[in-house]
């Protein structure tokens, strides 16, 4: 009679068992203190999450839904599918407003970025006075409506002090806000005047993160200020500059209040930017469904531009080792 020998049960190597035991020993059960920190963090985050849900997430979802309906506040929303989007594609005023908005964005971003960068570099290389920083930021403390009204008075063709100075110098008065050629550049420069200080301080904060040793080493090697700007400042400032550009582009596409108090979209729709056209469709003609469709289109455009900017400028990576 043959007895089958059974093989001994396999065992893990001693090192593996010890390693497993070590890993198990290093796992710590959540303590009461950690749980208390989590609850405290949730308490602090809750108001922000509530505000985000009520004032951003829900209106966004509601707007997307209304973009597929016909809604005028007086009757219940009626589902119309893609009719609002088809109307938008065939609406020449919509495309004209988009072109006007792009023109405004190009002027505003170009002048504001160059001016803010120059101011930030001057603040860093020449002086870091807190008083000068406060003076630079002063226009930003004024609301867009107030700034628009003040500049409307200054640039008035007949009574504005700006045109009085121009006439006193022997030149013809310029209808800054009443001429189709001058209107959009004027509005763009008004907003540049108001926002350039804030943008400059954001860039100045980025410049302060660049080690001063790099500039000192470059000076020892005989580099000029201009060469240091292009070889040190610009490469190391790129992530901050990219984020600032993304923020300013998004804000520029949403221009509304300056247009509303200065030109009201005129003359001859020359300043009828997209946000003002959406406002007119919603609260002027009570076409909330169509206005929502244009808002969704603007959201898609801004999202695409933001992603493209982020990737092209490599905003998530820094050259600072």
Image: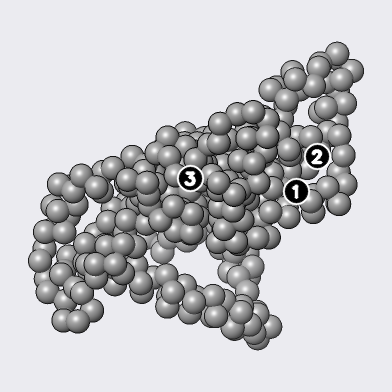
Measuring 44% from the left and 44% from the top, which residue is drawn there? 178
Measuring 11% from the left and 59% from the top, which residue is drawn there? 83
Who comes first in sequence, dot 2 or dot 3?
2
Nearer the observer, disc 2 or disc 3? 3
Residue 172 horizontal/vertical position (percent): 56, 31
Nearer the observer, disc 3 or disc 1? 3
Q: Is there CB contact under 8 Å for labels 1 and 2?
A: yes
Q: Marks 3 and 1, Cα distance to the nearest angstrom? A: 26 Å
The image's mark for residue 247 is none
Q: Is there CB contact under 8 Å for labels 3 and 1?
A: no
Q: Which residue is mark 3?
A: 177
Label 1 crowding class (10 Å Cα cut-off): few <14, some 14-19, many 20+? many
Helix, strand or loop at disc 1? helix
Helix, strand or loop at disc 2? helix
Q: Is residue 303 left or right of residue 292?
A: right
Is residue 152 positioned above or below 18 on the image?
above
Q: From this viewpoint, is residue 175 visible?
A: yes
Nearer the observer, disc 1 or disc 2? 1
Numbered-mark total? 3
Q: Which residue is mark 2?
A: 123
The quarter of the image holding the C terminus is: top right
Label 2 crowding class (10 Å Cα cut-off): few <14, some 14-19, many 20+? some
Helix, strand or loop at disc 3? loop
Residue 314 horizontal/vertical position (percent): 52, 36
């Amino acid at each position: 009679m043959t007895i089958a020998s059974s093989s001994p049960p396999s065992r893990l190597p001693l090192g593996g068992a010890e390693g497993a035991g070590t890993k198990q020993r290093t796992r710590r059960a959540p303590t009461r203190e950690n749980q208390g920190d989590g609850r405290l963090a949730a308490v602090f985050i809750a108001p922000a999450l509530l505000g985000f849900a009520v004032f951003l997430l829900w209106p966004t979802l509601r707007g997307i839904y209304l973009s597929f309906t016909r809604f005028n506040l007086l009757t219940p929303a009626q589902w119309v599918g893609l009719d609002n989007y088809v109307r938008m594609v065939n609406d020449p005023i919509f495309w004209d407003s988009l072109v006007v908005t792009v023109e405004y964005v190009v002027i505003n971003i170009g002048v504001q970025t160059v001016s803010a960068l120059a101011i930030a570099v001057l603040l860093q290389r020449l002086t870091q006075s807190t008083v000068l920083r406060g003076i630079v930021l002063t226009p930003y403390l004024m609301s867009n409506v107030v700034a628009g009204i003040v500049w409307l008075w200054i640039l008035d063709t007949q009574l504005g002090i700006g045109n009085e100075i121009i006439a006193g110098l022997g030149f013809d008065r310029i209808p800054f806000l009443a001429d189709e050629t001058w209107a959009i550049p004027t509005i763009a420069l008004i907003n540049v005047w108001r926002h350039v200080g804030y943008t400059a301080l954001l860039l100045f904060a980025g410049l302060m993160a660049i080690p001063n040793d790099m500039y000192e080493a470059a000076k020892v090697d005989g580099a000029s200020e201009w060469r240091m700007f292009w070889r040190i400042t610009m490469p190391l400032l790129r992530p901050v500059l990219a984020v600032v550009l993304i923020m300013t582009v998004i804000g520029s596409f949403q221009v509304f209040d300056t247009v509303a108090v200065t030109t009201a979209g005129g003359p001859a729709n020359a300043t009828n930017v997209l946000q003002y056209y959406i406002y007119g469709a919603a609260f002027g003609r009570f076409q909330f469904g169509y206005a929502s469709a244009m808002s969704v289109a603007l959201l898609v455009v801004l999202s695409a531009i933001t992603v493209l900017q982020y990737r092209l400028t490599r905003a998530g990576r820094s050259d600072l080792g």
